[in-house]
Image (cartoon, rainbow, N blue to C red):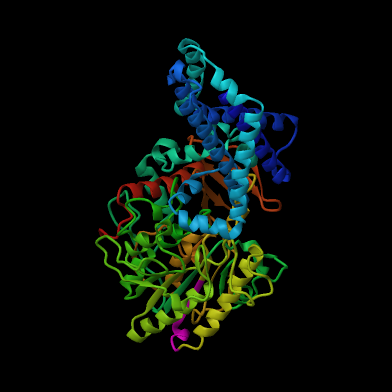
């Protein structure tokens, strides 16, 4: 009886949660009686599979319990305790799902798995974003009330009085264990994805089951799960695209290593790159926003080089860092920043190093988060953060400076406010400039992130009010930073590059929601270059190769990115993806590769951001496969390393 009661409670709560999410995003869901019915039925199927894992534990206990011990004091304690723990898990998971859905509009996925590693930052962020003591108290009260009513209706007493023989107990236990084994061995979470609408697919899933599915499939083997071509053919196609008249490709053939030659006199200004947290293009006035959230960035786009049709490669900060530093299309699974074999790689830092630059990564939080410190230090960058202050392991020795307490005016879960990190950048830039060596500073901001808290009195939106406040404060701090930098003797010889890491939210009804990958990017204070609005379709991976071209640099390259100004119409393209879907966008055509060796081709309607299915274009398909297959091959076969073989 107790197992049946727990199952009923779980199924009812899961149905209510699914209904909440349905109402939450009702306008995005493909509705109709058939659609709703199939969502409920598929959801029930996965809910039964999920609760079977709880039931399996109980079944083993009741099957193993000798008949004479049923109803004893020890049995009662274990039953009450087990039931309470089970309720605590499902109540907590349902609450966690609501917070996760509010941020990502998805069931649990690999991001939730990653968050288990960084419990300090995540718990602190949740505590700053929600009334955590009240919510935890509510969960505990819910557990207590549920146990009280289950006790009141006599479920526990009926369980303790049940004296079935072992033979009678083994049949229901075998059924429950059989269901659990079937789901473990044969049922994949992806089987719920039968709709074109992503929201329908997410609603049909079960959160706890999705979490453990993501835990099992955090890494995806490209050649096993995705469509492939012969490696030689894939590399040939990619190199045909990368090779230009002035570029010489190195051997061996399974490589993209080449020598890039650019026109003009070589210039070596300092370069400060500001990677802005979660800034979608749609929040800028330049892109049509009327709320005046970004007056500084909007004005900069009228004096510098702005890239008005540029797309992020992914949906997380580490994916943006991967694209920017490695200049590479996304690969399935986790970002390379978080994987093994992520050190001694050919990053943009190697190009700067070849020109005599220092290289420093600035972050307002602890660089331990998302493995950023190991990645940047392992690829030759010095580290300035709010971290532990030790030298990282590895062969590449870099320095690490801590942001000290007396340098902090405001701090939340993700680190110091943007004003504080910019003050640190100014301070360190003074030191670099005094050495006479050009410097490259990579700054990762944090203030435009939930809970969107910042020092009071800076802007007209109260701290903690939401994303609009985070964006406006981010823009305000950029203005203050540039005003302070202008006072420095090194300002006139410094180029400033601004670009977002990813959009504020990339969730949408399509498997890849194209408009939610569009981000702003601009280059400011580049001498001899007048204001330009570049409307060519391009990617995050192209910004630094474009900057290198503007500086007249010749260099050895292992980068996929190209000089945007030299792109012809047929060359224009952008890479977008998440941890399972990989997309190539060219003009208004989007090819999406899936992890079941699927390929879908769409016409992207820019007027309403819809994707209309088209028959597969084999030429487009082969090109898409080639890019992602080559990127994956290079990572897994040490083809991204620093060592060049001319």
Q: Which residues are magenta?
A: 489-497
Answer with left or right where residue 41 lies relative to residue 27: left
User: Looking at the picture, how far across and down is residue 468, in whole percent?
Assistant: 66, 65
Taking depth in this image into account, of 160 and 41 the one nearest to the observer is: 160
Q: Residue at x 56, y 42 (%)?
A: 93
Q: Residue at x 68, y 71 (%)?
A: 461
Taking depth in this image into account, of 415 and 605 the one nearest to the observer is: 415
556 w.r.t. 492: above or below: above
The number of callouts visible is 0
577 w.r.t. 372: above or below: above
Farthest residue toward the right? 32
Taking depth in this image into account, of 581 and 441 the one nearest to the observer is: 441
Residue 599 visible? The answer is: no
181 w.r.t. 29: above or below: above
User: Looking at the picture, how far across and down is residue 59, in whole percent?
Assistant: 48, 23
Magenta run includes residue 158? no
User: Looking at the picture, how far across and down is residue 375, in whole percent?
Assistant: 36, 60
The quarter of the displayed image where residue 161 is located: top right
Residue 159 visible? The answer is: yes
């Amino acid at each position: 009886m107790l197992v049946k009661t727990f199952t009923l409670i779980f199924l009812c709560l899961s149905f209510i949660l699914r209904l909440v999410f349905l109402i939450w995003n009702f306008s995005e869901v493909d509705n109709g009686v058939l659609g709703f019915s199939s969502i409920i039925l598929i959801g029930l199927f996965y809910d039964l599979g999920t609760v079977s894992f709880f039931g399996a534990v109980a079944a083993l206990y009741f099957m193993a319990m000798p008949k004479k011990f049923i109803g004893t004091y020890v049995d009662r304690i274990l039953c009450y305790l087990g039931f309470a723990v089970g309720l605590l898990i499902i109540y907590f998971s349902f609450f966690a799902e609501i917070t996760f859905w509010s941020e990502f509009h998805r069931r649990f996925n690999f991001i939730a798995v990653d968050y288990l590693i960084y419990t300090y930052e995540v718990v602190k962020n949740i505590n700053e974003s929600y009334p955590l003591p009240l919510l935890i108290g509510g969960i505990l009260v819910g557990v207590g009330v549920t146990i009280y009513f289950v006790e009141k209706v006599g479920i526990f007493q009926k369980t303790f009085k049940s004296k079935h023989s072992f033979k009678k107990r083994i049949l229901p236990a075998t059924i429950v264990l059989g269901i659990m084994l079937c789901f473990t061995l044969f049922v994949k979470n992806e089987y719920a994805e039968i709709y074109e609408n992503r929201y329908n697919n997410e609603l049909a899933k079960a959160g706890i089951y999705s979490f453990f599915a993501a835990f099992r499939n955090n890494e995806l083997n490209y050649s096993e799960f995705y469509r492939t071509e012969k490696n030689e053919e894939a590399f040939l196609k990619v190199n045909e695209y990368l090779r230009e008249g002035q570029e010489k490709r190195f051997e061996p053939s399974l490589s993209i290593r080449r020598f890039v030659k650019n026109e003009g006199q070589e210039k070596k200004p300092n370069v400060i790159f500001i990677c802005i947290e979660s800034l979608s293009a749609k929040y800028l006035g330049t892109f049509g926003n009327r709320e005046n959230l970004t007056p500084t960035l909007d004005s900069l786009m009228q004096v510098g080089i702005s890239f008005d049709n540029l797309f992020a490669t992914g949906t997380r900060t580490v994916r943006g860092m991967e694209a920017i530093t490695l200049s590479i299309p996304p690969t399935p699974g986790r970002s390379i920043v978080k994987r093994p074999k992520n050190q001694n790689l050919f990053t943009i830092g190697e190009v700067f190093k070849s020109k005599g630059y220092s290289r420093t990564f600035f972050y307002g939080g602890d660089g331990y988060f998302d493995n950023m410190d190991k990645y940047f230090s392992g690829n030759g960058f010095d580290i300035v953060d709010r971290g532990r202050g030790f030298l990282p392991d590895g062969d590449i020795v870099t320095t690490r400076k801590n942001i000290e307490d007396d340098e902090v005016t405001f701090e939340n879960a993700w680190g110091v406010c943007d004003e504080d990190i910019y003050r640190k950048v100014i301070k360190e830039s003074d030191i670099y400039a005094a050495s006479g060596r050009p410097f490259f500073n990579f700054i990762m901001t944090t203030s435009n992130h939930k809970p969107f808290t910042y020092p009071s009195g800076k802007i007209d939106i109260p701290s903690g009010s939401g994303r609009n406040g985070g964006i406006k404060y981010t823009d305000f701090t950029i203005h203050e930073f540039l005003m302070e930098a202008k006072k420095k003797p090194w300002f006139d010889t410094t180029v400033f590059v601004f670009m977002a890491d990813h959009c504020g939210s990339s969730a949408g009804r399509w498997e890849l929601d194209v408009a939610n990958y569009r981000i702003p990017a601009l280059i400011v204070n580049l001498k001899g270059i007048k204001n330009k609005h570049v409307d060519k379709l391009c990617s995050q991976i192209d910004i630094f190769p474009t900057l290198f071209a503007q500086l007249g640099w010749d260099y050895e390259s292992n980068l996929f990115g190209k000089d945007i100004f030299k792109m012809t119409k047929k060359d224009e393209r952008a890479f977008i993806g998440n941890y399972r879907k990989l997309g190539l966008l060219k003009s208004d055509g989007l090819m999406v590769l899936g992890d079941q060796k699927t390929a879908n081709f769409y016409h992207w309607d820019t007027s309403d951001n819809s994707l209309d299915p088209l028959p597969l274009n084999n030429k487009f398909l082969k090109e898409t496969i080639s890019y992602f297959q080559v990127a994956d091959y290079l990572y897994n076969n040490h083809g991204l390393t620093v060592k060049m073989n001319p």
